[in-house]
Image (cartoon, helix red, strand yellow):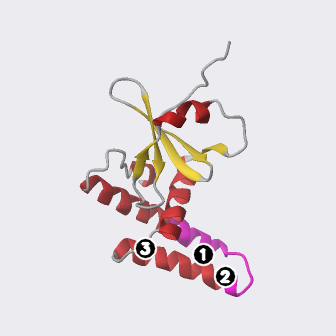
């Protein structure tokens, strides 16, 4: 007989390198949302909840809120293109990372702090835009400090 693991919601995961959030539904159930690499929005993924909750290592892992925000924005910045303030900030992060790579060095503490702050800001901006466009899973609150 297996026991259901203790789960504080919302909960955040990496599922085969893709950010996933598990949230409670108004009916008292669970819903999972997986980041869409095509739109940056959230796709229903409730069918993977059991796999996530009962996984033991491998390609599925728990994330802290901060890890979830950073991973989500890393994906959006890497896979999406566009114009406007969010994409200008993604380009800023890419330029910082490219400069360090070109110089053959790791990011400095200051650069890491800048990237972390920019990604928190773009997370809120992107999620607010998703809310305006009707994405039912959009939620800027994880990045609001």
Task: State the separation of the CA atoms marked 3 and 1.
Answer: 23 Å
Q: How crowded is mark 1: few (under 14 residues within 10 Å), some or many (20 or more)?
A: some
In the orientation shown, which residue stands out farthest toward the top?
A: 1
Please name which of the two marks, 1 or 2, marks the residue nearer to the observer. Answer: 2
- Label 2: which residue? 100
Which residue is disc 3 drawn over? 81
Could you say where residue 40 lies in the image, as x and y percent from the top left? Answer: 42, 59
Element under disc 2: helix
Question: Split into 4 quadrants, where in the image is the N terminus?
Answer: top right
Circle 3/circle 1 CB separation < 8 Å: no
Secondary structure of the residue carrying numbered label 3? loop
Q: What stretch is highlighted in magenta?
A: 101-117
Rendered image quadrant of residue 101:
bottom right
Relative to residue 67, is residue 81 depicted above or below? below
Mark linked to residue 111: 1
Left or right, 44 with respect to 113, comes to left
Q: Which residue is drawn at 45% across and 55% down?
A: 36
């Amino acid at each position: 007989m297996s026991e259901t693991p203790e789960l504080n919601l919302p909960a955040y995961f990496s599922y085969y390198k893709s950010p996933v959030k598990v949230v409670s539904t108004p009916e008292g159930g669970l819903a999972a949302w997986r980041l869409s690499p095509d739109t940056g929005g959230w796709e229903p993924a409730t069918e993977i909840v059991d796999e996530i909750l009962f996984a033991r290592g491998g390609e599925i892992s728990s994330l802290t809120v901060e890890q979830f925000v950073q991973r989500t924005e890393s994906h959006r910045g890497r896979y999406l293109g566009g114009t406007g303030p969010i994409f200008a900030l993604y380009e800023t992060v890419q330029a910082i990372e490219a400069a360090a790579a070109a110089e053959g060095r790791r990011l400095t503490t200051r650069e890491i702090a800048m990237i972390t702050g920019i990604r928190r800001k773009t997370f809120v901006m992107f999620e607010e835009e998703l809310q305006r466009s009707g994405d039912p899973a959009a939620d800027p609150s994880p990045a609001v400090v």
